[in-house]
Image (tube, grey):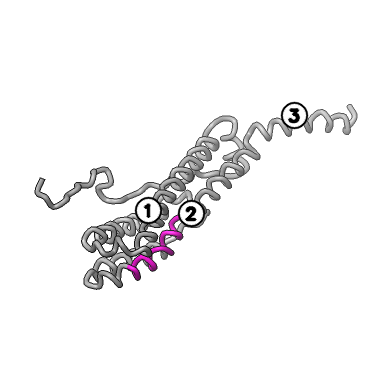
Amino acid sequence: MNTRLMTALVAPVAIVSLSGCGVNTIPTAEEQAKAQWANVEAAFQRRANLIPNLVATVRGAAASEERILTGVTQARADATRITVTPEQLNDPAAMQRFSEAQSRLSAAIIPLQRLQEAYPQLQSQQNFATLMTQLEGTENRINIEIRDYNEAVRRYNTTIRTFPNVIGAKIFYGSEPLVPYQAVTPNAEVAPTVDFGNGQ
């Protein structure tokens, strides 16, 4: 049989076989997960950028609450120091460190939000109200981006573990599962108690 004819017959079979092994599907799913992680980091960075303005606004009206403001500032600094690169998305320890730092910042923001109740004049300041609205919106955005990242990780991890993609994942890419983001805020499962100070 002619070599050209043999090549012409084998090439389509090879292409179909390779495409069936996830040659294109696996990197596409991995890149989508990495792009979504960048969105998570951007949402956390937006929050970190808002906090200095919020702290400055509150400091002006509630100077006696320096401990809370210092705690928020320190938690922000710690949270922005810890990062996870796309290459570390399959490292559970790196993801845990990042999650813990972000959770500490989330926990530090709660007393800052309570200052608003203790100092009613803060509520009347437009800058404070605007910043609180932006901070709440950012928290919502963070939750959405984390959900979308975890969904992208789920799709990628499923892709590299299911047949026939598992063949390409092992042979061509040496793919490892990515780690989903898990919040580690203490007692997150416990509903907060609302106390209006009336003893009921």
Residue position marked by numbered label 3 in the rendering: 13
Q: Are marks 1 and 3 in contact (CB under 8 Å)?
A: no
- Taking depth in this image into account, of 20 and 31 the one nearest to the observer is 31
Residue 197, how many percent across, how many down?
13, 52
Task: Tell whether position 52 is magenta.
Answer: yes
Q: Give the SS element for disc 3.
A: helix
With 38 as the anchor, is 44 left or right in this view? left
Cα–Cα span, label 1 and label 2: 29 Å
The mark found on residue 136 in the picture is: 1
The mark found on residue 22 in the picture is: none
Q: In the figure, residue 117 lies in which quadrant?
A: bottom left
Prevailing secondary structure class for the magenta stretch in the rendered image: helix
| Magenta-colored span | 41-57
Residue position marked by numbered label 2 in the rendering: 88
- Taking depth in this image into account, of 179 and 101 the one nearest to the observer is 101
Amino acid type at circle 3 is Val
Task: Tell whether position 128 is magenta.
Answer: no
Cα–Cα span, label 1 and label 3: 54 Å
Mark in the foreground, 3 or 2? 2
- Above-or-below relation of 32 to 61: above
With 77 as the anchor, is 176 left or right in this view? right
- Going from N to C along the chain, the mark reached first, 1 or 2, is 2
Cα–Cα span, label 3 and label 2: 36 Å
